Amino acid sequence: MSVVGYTTGVFDLFHIGHLNILRRAKEQCDYLIVGVTVDEAVSYKGKKAFVPYEERAAIVAAIKYVDMVVPQVTMDKMAAWEKYHFNKIFVGDDWKGTETWNHWEEEFAKVGVEVVYFPYTKQTSSTELRKGLAALSK
């Protein structure tokens, strides 16, 4: 039986942390589906994407670890499971233990989906890259 994996992200200002998550995810599944957050849904982070959705999706699709890119139009992970029927979902460990992901762990346990947390790449983040770009533009 093949293992289908799923992960999501904005993937704005693509960096090594993004690549690490995609590589680690692919190491644990046979087929990796990546949900790239659409521009309209990025507001959940309280900001606007620097790179438009179509470009972010094209970048992610070009990564050799990714088998399929889909638009993430909602943060409802169960809706994604109902559509794509993955066996594992991959998440940064900065979400582990949060109320949101405790809830998703309970929901996914009911349908046999394993939640796998990966270490967050602390030294590089899109937020830090944004700060650096803002400082350079002053």
Image (spheres, grey):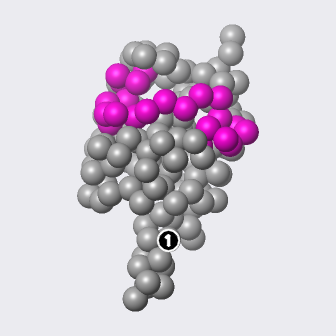
Quarter of the image holding residue 121?
bottom right
The N terminus - image quarter: top right
Q: Position of residue 55 (x, y in %)?
A: 52, 47
Numbered-mark total = 1
Find out whether residue 7 is within the magenta segment. no
- Judged from this view, the residue extending furthest toward the bottom is 138
Using the rendered image of the protein, determine whether residue 41 is visible from the camera's viewpoint. Answer: yes
Residue shown at the point (55%, 32%) measured from the top left: 69
Question: What's drawn in magenta, residue-wise?
Answer: 60-81
Left or right: where does residue 126 sit relative to residue 102?
Answer: right
Find disc 1 in the rendering and name its residue.
129
Q: Is residue 93 visible?
A: no
Q: Amino acid at mark 1?
A: Leu
> What residue is at 44 percent from the left and 84 percent from the top?
137
Query: Compared to 82, does 32 lie above or below?
Result: below
Mark 1 element type = helix
**Depicted 113 relative to depicted 27: above or below:** above
Disc 1 crowd, CA 10 A, few/some/many (<14, 14-19, 20+): some
Query: What residue do we see at 49% from left, 30% from top?
Result: 70
Instruction: Kindly identify the residue that appears in the image at 68 percent across and 42 percent down.
Output: 63
Q: Is residue 74 magenta?
A: yes
- Quarter of the rendering occupied by the C terminus: bottom left
Q: Nearer the viewer, residue 98 or 56?
A: 56
From the top left corner, tell me how far across and down residue 21 is, in percent: 60, 47
Q: Where does residue 25 sit, x and y in percent of width and height?
A: 63, 38
Is 7 on the left-hand or right-hand side of 24? left
Residue 28, image x, y percentages: 68, 33
Left or right relative to 24: residue 34 = left
The residue nearer to you, when weighing 122 against 32, is: 32
